Amino acid sequence: MDQPPDSPGLEPPPSTENTTRVLVVDDDPTVAEVVSGYLERAGYRVDRAADGFVALARAAAHRPDLVVLDLMLPGMDGLEVCRRLRAQGPVPVIMLTARGDEDDRILGLEVGADDYVTKPFSPRELVLRVESVLRRTRPVSAARPLHAAGLAVDPSARRATKNGAELALTLREFDLLAFFLRNPGRAYAREDLMREVWGWDFGDLSTVTVHVRRLRGKVEDDPARPRLIQTVWGVGYRFDGTGPEGGPVRPGREHPATVETVKEAGS
């Protein structure tokens, strides 16, 4: 992993300096020190923990705005820490893993991690990922509510409901659902979704696959036979929400929307 340069070259973001708290959880003191140093130079307030029990205690005492969490921890692994953090309330999580096995990365995403970085990694890249995740947590006051097929998304409040019931969505699940509602009827490749929702021109596309599967589990009546988030074979995914007259649902419309099932195209 890169060591901090004499001149860090990272300007503190004005909107987060001395206000945004990041909890770094890693039992390797060198990794924790380097990551914490880069984040502090970028303007973040950093707490550190070397194991899961201490991490949960510090998160309960001072709720972090984001957690950088190592998968392999003594006593309680990062997956269990992530589960317990989610039980306390929504918080963005970036998972660190030294494992190259895709199953481990997917498992981290399945328990609610918003992103992951595989060791060895560049601390500068990690800071950029932290900034990207936090940027998407900030309310957008100008964004209008979105409605389709019994779903309602309020970007400014970061709140989503289905038929009036609150949906427990992670950061990326929320952003993915909002993107689909803003762009109904159009098929998007996983690469497009990675760029538009995650803000990255590169990355493991299984991240998108896992988040689509998790989102279906929360918004579909029957996730095994999805009607809202359709798979377009050979392309990617399409959200099929249409208005009562058959036209696309507009942002801010309050009326319920019907869903027309479209046959999946063959690859």
Image (cartoon, rainbow, N blue to C red):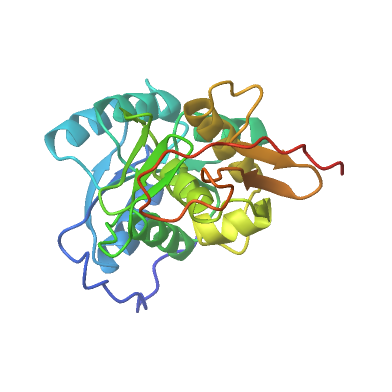
Image coordinates of residue 85 in percent, x first then y, are: 30, 30
Extreme residue in the left direction = 61
| The quarter of the displayed image where residue 68 is located | top left
From the image, which quarter does the C terminus lie in? Answer: top right
| The quarter of the displayed image where residue 139 is located | bottom left
Image coordinates of residue 259 in percent, x first then y, are: 58, 36
Q: Is residue 151 above or below residue 4?
A: above
Q: Is residue 99 visible to us here?
A: no
| The quarter of the displayed image where residue 102 is located | top right
Which residue is nearer to you in this view: 27 or 245? 245
211 to the left or right of 52? right
Residue at the image position 30 percent from the left and 40 percent from the top:
91
Number of callouts: 0
Image coordinates of residue 210 in percent, x first then y, are: 59, 36
Extreme residue in the front direction = 245
225 to the left or right of 165? right
Which residue is nearer to you in this view: 148 or 10? 148
